[in-house]
Image (tube, rainbow, N blue to C red):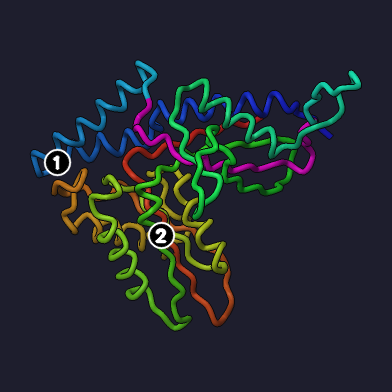
């Protein structure tokens, strides 16, 4: 059994939070650059070039890509042969007993990252009543899975509120066909409009159940934008949806143009014979995520 220290996990998450908010992934930059080259609307092309320049300045000067530095969504893939050692904290007796878990290490890293990176803290403790800011950007949203091996994979996504607010879920009849699902997805993106800061990355989850379809739609956003779904049916659906969405003419920042979305990414799971859940997770042009493997 391999052991990774609490401090190593927290320090890694801290680094990922800061890097994610300052450095746009290469595949996202490549997609923006391709869009700028092919965009037929001069104003839209200029806007895309401004987004690319914004990313360059953010990385160079260590300035956040966006003022909304997001809710920290952390995906953990923990090998079955690896454990996180608890942190040792001083006690009144002078002993240093085990005090923390992998989840605690992740949240400690998020807190440190948002503090040391001078990133805006956007988490409120109570969702409906007091809505007081926790002041730490924690707790993070953590999705944990166990996989074979002795590695620990950590992915941090900084998810902005504006685009997340435009995400939707729908439970279709099990008899629904591709065209009905496709039309709904296009309408969800159309409704997002300028409010969600296009050009978008559109994550789609199909199957599972109520909560799994939503998780799939968010996990889809972690795929490289240039990698189609491995299943030919869904790969073609992704291409079709991207064409339909870009034909909406919303364009970069909602000012019109050919580029309303950079990619549509679909993930699927088996589901009940009586169900067909579909979720759409909208991501803005500032698609921020970083991964490390320990």
Q: Residue at x 25, y 34 (%)?
A: 33
SS for tag 1? helix
Q: Residue at x 51, y 42 (%)?
A: 132
Q: Estimate the x, y position of residue 69 in percent, counting from the top left.
A: 42, 34
Q: Label 2 belongs to which residue? A: 280
Q: Which residues are magenta?
A: 64-85
Q: Residues within 10 Å of mark 1 (few under 14, many from 20)?
A: many
Q: Does the magenta run of residues contain 81? A: yes
Q: Residue at x 35, y 17 (%)?
A: 60
Q: Does the magenta run of residues contain 247? A: no
Q: Estimate the x, y position of residue 213 in percent, counting from the top left.
A: 51, 63
Is 73 left or right of 198, judged from the image as shown? right
- Would you place residue 54 above or below residue 198 in this image? above
SS for tag 2? strand
Q: Residue 100's quadrant in the figure?
A: top right
Residue that protrudes farthest toward the left in the picture: 42
- Quadrant of the image containing the C terminus: top right
Label whose residue precedes the other's in the sequence (1 or 2): 1
Q: Residue at x 30, y 23 (%)?
A: 56
- Would you place residue 146 above or below residue 154 in this image? below
């Amino acid at each position: 059994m391999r052991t990774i220290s609490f401090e190593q996990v927290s320090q890694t998450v801290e680094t990922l939070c800061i890097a994610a908010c300052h450095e746009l992934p290469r595949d996202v930059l490549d997609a923006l650059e391709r869009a700028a080259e092919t965009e037929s609307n001069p104003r839209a092309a200029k806007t895309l070039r401004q987004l690319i320049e914004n990313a360059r300045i953010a990385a160079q000067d260590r300035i956040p890509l966006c003022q909304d530095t997001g809710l920290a969504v952390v995906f953990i893939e923990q090998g079955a042969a690896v454990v996180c050692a608890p942190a040792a904290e001083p006690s009144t007796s002078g002993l240093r007993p085990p005090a923390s878990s992998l989840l605690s290490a992740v949240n400690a890293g998020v807190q440190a990252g948002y503090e040391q990176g001078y990133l805006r803290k956007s988490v409120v403790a109570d969702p409906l009543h007091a809505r007081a800011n926790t002041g730490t950007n924690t707790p993070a949203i953590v999705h944990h899975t166990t996989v074979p091996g002795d590695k620990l994979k950590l992915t941090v996504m900084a998810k902005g509120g504006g685009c997340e607010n435009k995400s939707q879920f729908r439970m279709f009849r099990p008899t629904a066909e591709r065209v009905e699902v496709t039309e709904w997805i296009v309408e969800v993106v159309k409704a997002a409009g300028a409010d969600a800061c296009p050009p978008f990355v559109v994550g789609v989850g199909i199957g599972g159940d109520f909560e799994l379809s939503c998780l799939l739609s968010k996990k889809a956003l972690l795929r490289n934008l240039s990698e189609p779904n491995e299943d030919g049916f869904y790969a073609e659906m992704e291409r079709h949806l991207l064409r339909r969405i870009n034909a909406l003419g919303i364009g970069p920042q909602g000012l019109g143009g050919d580029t309303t979305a950079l990619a549509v990414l679909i993930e699927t799971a088996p589901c009940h014979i009586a169900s067909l859940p579909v979720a759409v997770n909208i991501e803005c042009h500032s698609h921020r995520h970083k991964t490390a493997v320990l």
